[in-house]
Image: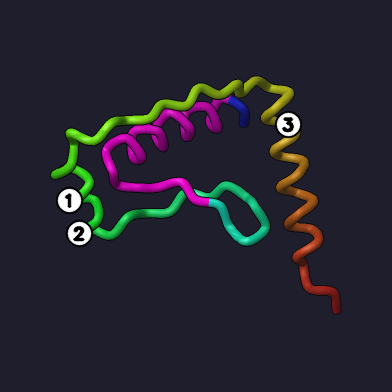
Amino acid sequence: SFSKSVENLFHSSFLVKDGRARLAVDEKFNAIMEPKAINEASATQATSGAPREQVILRFDQKTWKAFVDRSRSRRASQTPKD
C-alpha cells in the first residue's frame, strides 16, 4: 500500500543516516539499498564530523503507482518461461 511504502521510506532514511545501510545503483541503474558491514557502520559513526548530505524527494500516489507498475513488469519479465 502507499502508506506502508511511505513508512518504509521514512524508516530506511534513518538506517542510511545512522550509517547502517547505504544506497547504491546496480548494473541496470536501479536504486538499491544494502546493509553495511558492522565494521563499516562503526567507521561511519566514528567519522560523524563528515559533512552530511540531504536529499528531498517527491513521493506521491502517482509516483508510487509508477514504481509499482515498473516493479511488476520487471518481475514478469524475469519469470522463467517453461
Cα separation, mark 3 vs mark 2, equals: 37 Å
**Sooner in the amino-acid sequence: mark 1 or mark 3:** 1
Q: Is residue 47 left or right of residue 21?
A: left
Q: Residue at x 17, y 42 (%)?
A: 47
Q: Are marks 1 and 2 in contact (CB under 8 Å)?
A: yes
Nearest to viewer (mark 3 / mark 2): 2
Circle 3 Cα neighbour tier, 10 Å, few/some/many (<14 / 14–19 / ≥20) = few
Which secondary structure dominates the residues rendered in magenta?
helix
- Label 2 near label 3: C-beta < 8 Å? no
Give the mark nearer the N terminus: 3 vs 2: 2
* Residue 71 sits inside the magenta stretch: no
Element carrying mark 1:
helix
Disc 1 to disc 2, C-alpha distance? 5 Å
Residue 10 pos. (x, y %): 43, 28
Instruction: Locate residue 62, reporting x and y percent.
Output: 73, 23
Q: Residue furthest right?
A: 82
Q: Is residue 77 left or right of residue 71?
A: right
> Residue 42: which disc?
1
